[in-house]
Image (cartoon, rainbow, N blue to C red):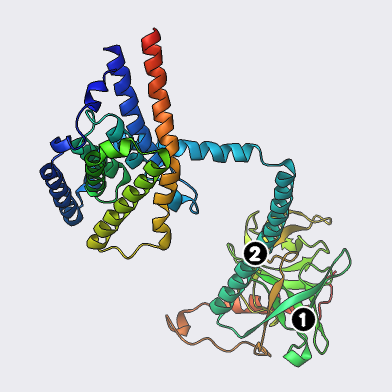
C-alpha cells in the first residue's frame, strides 16, 4: 500500500496547504478575472485555441446528438404517417396559393402593359374586360363589359396592348359587342409600314389570319412586313399595329397578289381591352396640317389625287360590309 | 512504474471526463440541475490522493474549465482553488465520515462554491440569478456517492489486478 505512510500523519498535518498559498492563488484568480473582464482575453484565447477546443465541444455534444438520433430512428411509424399527411396537405395548400399568386402576377403585367399603351397614346381611352368570347368560323365577336351607360357607342375602336382588335358594332346598356378584325365581315384599311403600300385587310374568319387582297402583282410586299392602320376612312386612327405579313402569293384569279397576315393584337388571349373614345368625326377632307418645313409651292401635288382614290373603298368599313 | 502510470491515467481521465460532463449540453429544463462535476472529482482526489492534488492543480483545472466554458477567465480557478483548500484542510476528518455525512459535507462545500460564484457574478455586474441557481448543489450531493464509489471501484479493481498479476 503506497498510501499507508501518508495516513499515519497527524490530523492537522496539512500545514503544507498553507493559507498563504490559498490567498496567493485567490489573488491571482481575482487579477485574472478583472483583467479578462476589462480586456476580453478569454475570448481571444478561446479563438486561438479553437483548434483544440472545438473537438472537445463536439465530444461533449456527442451523447445528446446520439440520443436525438436514436429518438428519430425509433419514432413510431404512425407518428411519421401523420406527419407525412399533414405536410402533404400543407404542400397542396401552399401550391394552390402559389398558383393563384402566379395568375395575379400575370394579370398585373397585362394591366401594366395596357396602362403603358394608354399613356403612350395620349388619347382618351376606357378600360374594359372581355366577358364572352365567340371565336368561331362564322362569327369573330367578343362581348365587353361596358355599354351605353358607360358611354360606349357603335363604331368605337377596340385595342389591346399590342394592336387593333376590332370595333364596337352593337351596344347594350351595360355590355357591347365588338367585331374582331379577323371576322369574315370585317375590313380595315392598312398600310405597309416598310413600303407605304396601302391596302385593305379583310378578316378570314380564322382568329389568327388576316387577308390583304387586291395587291398589284408588282407591289412591294414581303413576308415579315408590319402593317398598321392607315387612318383612311376615318374609322380607325392611323398608326396602330394591325399585324405582320406571313405569306404573299397570287390570288385565285391570278391578276392580283394576296397576302396573309397574323394579327398583332392578342385576339385569343386578351382579357382586358381598351376602348378608344371621342374620336373626332372626320367628315370631309382632313384639316390642313400646320405649316412646317419648306413652302407649299415647292411641295409636289400629284400624291393627293391618288390618296383620295384609295380612301374610297375604305369608307365601307364602319358598318363592316364585306368587300367580297 | 506501470501501476503509477495507470493511476495517473485514472486521475487525468477522471478530471478530463468531469470537464466533458460539465460541457455536455442538456435540455433547457434540466440544465440548472447539472452537478458541478469538476468539483466532485477534485473533492474525491483531494480526499483520497492529496499527494497528487493541491491548490495549484485545482487552479489549473479551473483555468482549463474557464477556457472551455468561456464565462470569465479565473472564475472557476478561484472557486476550485478555494474548494480544494477547504477539503485539504479538513481532509482527515472528512475521510472517516460515513457516506451520508460526507455527502452533507459535500453539500455544504458546493453551496459555498455557489456563494463564491454568486459574488463573482455580482461583482462582474450580472443580475441576480434565478432560484434554480441553487438546485445544482443538491443534485451534486445526490451524485457524490456514485462518483465516490465509481472511482473507488475502478481504483480497487486496478489494485487487485496489480497484486494478483
Residue B27, given in percent of the width and then of the height, sits at 50, 49
**Which image quarter: residue B58?**
top left
Residue B102 visible to the viewer: yes
* Tag 2–tag 1 contact (CB < 8 Å): no
Q: Quadrant of residue A130?
A: bottom right
Q: In what quadrant of the picture does the N terminus of chain A appear? A: top left
- Pick out the residue farthest to the top: B165
Quarter of the picture containing the C terminus of chain A is bottom right
Where's residue A2, x and y in %? Answer: 26, 18
Residue A145's disc number: 1
A15 on left or right of A201: left
The location of residue B116, given as percent across then percent down, is 26, 54
| Residue lying at 75% horizontally and 84% vertically, measured from the top left | A146
Q: Is B37 above or below relative to A204?
A: above
Q: Nearer the viewer, residue A245 or A76?
A: A76
Comparing A111 with B106, the one in front is: B106
The picture places residue A108, in percent across and down from the top left corner, at: 61, 70
Q: Which residue is mark 2?
A: A101
Of the image marks 2 and 1, the number of the one nearer the N terminus: 2
Where is B32 relative to A229, above or below? above
For label 1, count other residues whose C-alpha is less than 10 Å away and answer few (under 14), some (14-19) or many (20+).
some
Label 1: chain letter = A
Helix, strand or loop status at disc 2: helix
The Cα atoms of the two marked residues, 2 and 1, are separated by 25 Å
Q: Residue at x 33, y 33 (%)?
A: B15
Q: Chain of mark 2?
A: A
Amino acid at each position: 500500500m503506497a498510501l499507508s505512510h501518508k495516513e499515519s500523519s497527524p490530523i492537522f498535518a496539512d500545514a503544507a496547504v498553507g493559507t498563504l498559498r490559498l490567498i496567493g492563488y485567490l489573488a491571482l484568480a481575482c487579477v485574472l478575472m478583472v483583467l479578462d473582464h476589462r480586456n476580453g482575453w478569454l475570448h481571444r484565447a478561446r479563438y486561438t485555441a479553437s483548434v483544440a477546443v472545438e473537438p472537445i465541444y463536439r465530444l461533449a455534444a456527442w451523447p445528446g446528438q446520439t440520443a436525438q438520433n436514436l429518438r428519430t430512428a425509433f419514432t413510431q411509424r404512425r407518428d411519421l404517417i401523420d406527419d407525412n399527411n399533414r405536410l402533404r396537405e400543407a404542400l397542396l395548400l401552399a401550391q394552390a396559393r402559389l398558383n393563384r399568386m402566379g395568375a395575379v402576377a400575370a394579370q398585373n403585367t397585362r394591366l401594366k402593359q395596357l396602362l403603358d399603351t394608354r399613356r403612350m397614346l395620349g388619347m382618351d381611352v376606357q378600360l374594359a374586360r372581355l366577358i364572352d368570347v365567340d371565336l368561331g368560323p362564322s362569327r369573330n365577336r367578343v362581348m365587353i363589359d361596358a355599354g351605353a351607360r358607360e358611354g360606349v357607342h357603335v363604331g368605337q375602336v377596340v385595342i389591346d396592348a399590342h394592336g387593333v382588335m376590332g370595333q364596337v358594332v352593337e351596344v347594350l346598356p351595360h355590355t357591347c359587342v365588338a367585331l374582331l378584325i379577323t371576322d369574315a365581315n370585317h375590313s380595315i384599311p392598312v398600310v405597309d409600314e416598310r413600303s407605304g403600300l396601302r391596302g385593305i385587310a379583310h378578316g378570314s374568319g380564322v382568329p389568327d389570319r388576316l387577308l390583304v387582297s387586291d395587291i398589284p402583282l408588282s407591289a412591294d410586299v414581303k413576308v415579315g412586313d408590319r402593317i398598321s392602320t392607315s387612318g383612311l376612312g376615318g374609322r380607325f386612327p392611323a398608326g396602330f399595329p394591325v399585324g405582320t405579313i406571313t405569306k404573299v402569293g397570287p390570288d385565285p384569279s391570278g391578276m392580283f397578289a394576296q397576302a396573309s397576315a397574323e394579327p398583332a393584337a392578342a385576339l385569343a388571349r386578351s382579357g382586358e381591352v381598351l376602348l378608344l373614345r371621342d374620336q373626332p368625326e372626320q367628315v370631309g377632307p382632313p384639316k390642313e396640317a400646320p405649316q412646317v418645313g419648306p413652302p407649299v409651292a415647292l411641295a409636289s401635288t400629284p400624291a393627293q389625287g391618288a390618296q383620295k382614290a384609295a380612301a374610297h373603298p375604305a369608307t365601307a368599313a364602319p358598318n363592316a360590309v364585306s368587300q367580297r | 512504474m506501470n501501476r503509477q502510470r495507470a493511476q495517473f491515467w485514472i486521475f487525468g481521465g477522471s478530471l478530463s471526463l468531469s470537464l466533458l460532463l460539465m460541457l455536455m449540453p442538456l435540455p433547457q429544463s434540466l440544465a440548472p440541475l447539472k452537478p458541478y462535476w469538476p468539483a466532485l472529482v477534485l473533492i474525491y482526489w483531494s480526499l483520497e490522493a492529496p499527494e497528487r492534488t493541491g491548490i495549484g492543480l485545482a487552479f489549473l483545472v479551473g483555468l482549463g474549465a474557464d477556457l472551455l466554458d468561456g464565462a470569465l477567465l479565473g472564475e472557476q480557478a478561484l472557486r476550485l482553488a478555494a474548494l480544494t483548500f477547504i477539503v485539504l484542510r479538513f481532509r482527515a476528518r472528512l475521510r472517516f465520515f460515513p457516506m451520508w455525512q460526507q455527502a452533507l459535507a459535500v453539500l455544504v462545500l458546493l453551496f459555498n462554491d455557489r456563494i463564491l460564484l454568486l459574488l463573482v457574478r455580482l461583482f462582474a455586474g450580472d443580475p441576480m440569478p434565478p432560484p434554480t441557481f441553487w438546485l445544482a448543489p443538491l443534485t451534486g450531493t445526490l451524485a457524490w456517492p456514485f462518483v465516490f464509489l465509481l472511482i473507488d471501484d475502478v481504483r480497487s479493481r486496478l489494485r487487485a489486478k496489480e497484486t494478483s498479476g
